[in-house]
Image (tube, rainbow, N blue to C red):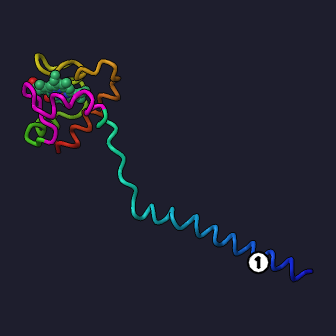
Amino acid sequence: MAALVWRRWAVFGMAMLVCACEQGGPAASAAAVGEPAPPHPGKITYERYCFSCHAAGTAGAPLLGAKEDWAPRIARGVDELLRTTIEGIPPAMPPRGLCMRCDDATLREAVEYMVEASK
Ligand code: HEC
């Protein structure tokens, strides 16, 4: 009787060990390999509202990824770029980049995305 009880505990203990291994295993290897980085939060806004001008250079818009277009702008800082984005730059850069429903934080993400992609 006592032997049976011990055997049950032994099986239980082994099951726990296997379980612990499984928990540690895949999670640890996923962390080591690294999940793909999530897209920049500003990318969605950019692609919806800013892309139309900034991917084509329409009316002199600084092209996404064009370092020479962006370097002097990046030098002025994201705060300043956000200000001109919100106010617009007449005649060609419309206020809020035409995204009237974007709040300032959303616009900042879009500006940061463009800056990051253009360094
Ligand atoms: C209708 C076309 C158009 C759209 C849409 C547009 N832009 Fe622009 N943007 C421009 C043009 C043109 C300029 C260059 C203005 C200049 O330097 O005279 C510009 C300049 C900028 C600059 C540089 C500002 C500076 O101070 O030099 C930023 C930042 C910017 N846009 C962000 C955005 C963001 C963010 C969006 C989307 C939410 C957006 N733009 C949508 C046309 C556009």
Residue identified by numbered label 1: 10
Q: Residue at position x 34%, y 38% from top? A: 41
Q: Quadrant of ligand 1?
A: top left
Q: Could you say where residue 28 lies in the image, as x and y percent from the top left?
A: 49, 65
Residue that lies at the very extreme toward the right in this rendered image: 1
In the rendered structure, the answer to whether residue 17 lies left or right of residue 88 reads right
Q: Is residue 8 above or below residue 116?
A: below
| Foreground pick, 79 / 88 | 88
Q: Which residues are magenta?
A: 45-65
**SS at mark 1?**
helix
Instruction: Tell me the amino acid under the disc marked 1.
Output: Ala
In the rendered structure, the answer to whether residue 3 lies left or right of residue 30 reads right
Q: Residue at position x 22%, y 23% from top? A: 97
Q: Residue at position x 10%, y 31% from top? A: 57
Q: Could you say where residue 55 lies in the image, as x and y percent from the top left?
A: 15, 34
Q: Could you say where residue 31 lies in the image, as x and y percent from the top left?
A: 44, 61
Q: Residue at position x 12%, y 16% from top? A: 90
